[in-house]
Image (cartoon, rainbow, N blue to C red):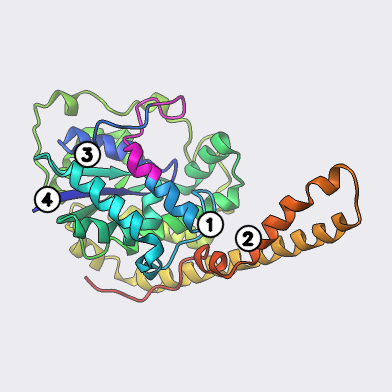
Amino acid sequence: MNRIIVVAGMHRGGTSAAAAALHSLGVEFGSNLMPATGDNEKGYWEDLEIKRLNVELLHRLGSAWYVPGVPSPGRFAGSEFAPFRLRAVRLLRKHLAGSRPFGIKDPRMARLLPFWRNAIATAGAVPSFLIALRHPQSVAQSLARRDGLERQLSYDLWLEHMTAAEMDSRGFDRVVVDFDLLVGDAPAQTKRIARLLNLALDATSPTLRNPFIDPELVRSNPDGPDAPPAESVPMEVQAMYARLASLARTDLPDQEAARGCSDGSAWVGDSALALRVRVAARVGAARGALHARIELLKGSSGPLARVLPIVRAARRIFGRKDFNDDVRRVNPPRIRTG
């Protein structure tokens, strides 16, 4: 049966490096790829059509990559998402025409895995997963540099992406790859990926021998002078990182490795609940500030009055029930086995 390998992880979280390792093992990512930029000089390995579909999916949910919220799996079953499902299946079938495994890489994928798992099955393929792990302090540092994201928002997004990636890949062949270990010894980590995902390994391949990762291009690390202080990392983020880091340091198949971390199920639920409560408080505060600003603008004239229609539109969005249903945090997960 055809095989698709999904790279899941956080933005600025090592997904591109992980995809490059897969490509060195013969995984095909297509020819219509997002070009390299100064932020990622080695390339992104993102199919532009798949990326565009993910952007439109999030937009349909009233969201974007930097907006917290994971849609419930059943959200995609409605008729409004039928055109998206059809596009996804057609894209996948087009790429499955080749003989090599096909890889999908886009950090948005982590929050959309239920949608893509369904599309992969409909396309007649079987998914495997590579979860790309990078230290949350490094991610926060990188996002602050590239996008100006506030540190706490980066931590929230990191936890959300990594929790969703871990939960929604359970029961499938998968491997967790630590970015720092991959940078430190790319050949060893690539061989580990090949073993755990049952990919063919040609030790003589020039692609494998030539470094696809340049340590000089790694500008963010948790020990760097610009890194956020360790005490700034929320406890649930630290716990999730510790769990995934342990899975990234084993050569055992996932089911055996997971048994060694079986005590993590309870705090995954606690972490998700804490995240949901924290964001609910933030949304409530933002909504209150927005309404207060509207009341202030009502009696204004001149330049301030001209922005009132924009603020009213924002209030309508924040007040919509489907927005509040869609842009929400991960619910405390049901414990799933296998």
Q: Nearer the viewer, mark 4 or mark 1?
A: 1
Mark 1 to mark 2 CA distance (whole Å):
8 Å
Task: Determine which residue is flagged by label 4.
Answer: 2
* Residue neighbourhood size for the residue with mark 4, other residues' Cα within 10 Å, grouped as few (<14), some (14–19), many (≥20): some
For the residue labelled by badge 3, is the local secondary structure a helix, a strand or a loop? Answer: helix
At x 44%, y 64%, the residue is 71
In front here: 48 or 331? Answer: 48
Q: Which of the two labelled residues, at mark 3 and mark 2, occupies the earlier sequence position?
A: 3
Q: Which residue is mark 2?
A: 317
Residue 166 seen anywhere in this rendered image of the structure: yes
From the top left corner, tell me how far across and down residue 263 is, in percent.
34, 71
Marks 4 and 3, how far apart at CA? 16 Å
> Which of these two is toward me, 184 or 148?
148
Q: CA distance from mark 2 to mark 4?
A: 41 Å
| Residue hosting label 1 | 62
The reply to whether residue 192 is visible in this rendering is no
Q: Which mark is residue 288?
A: none
Q: Is residue 51 magenta?
A: yes
Q: Amino acid at mark 1?
A: Gly
Question: Do the residues under discs 4 and 1 have CB atoms within 8 angstroms?
Answer: no
Closer-to-camera residue (178/338) = 338
Examine the structure image and report whether residue 144 is included in the region drawn in magenta.
no
Q: Earlier in the sequence, mark 3 or mark 1?
A: 3
Q: Position of residue 306 (x, y in %)?
A: 81, 45
Tell me if 52 is positioned left or right of 282 in this view: left
Q: Nearer the viewer, mark 2 or mark 4?
A: 2
| Start-end of magenta stretch | 36-52
**Which residue is tagged 3?**
22
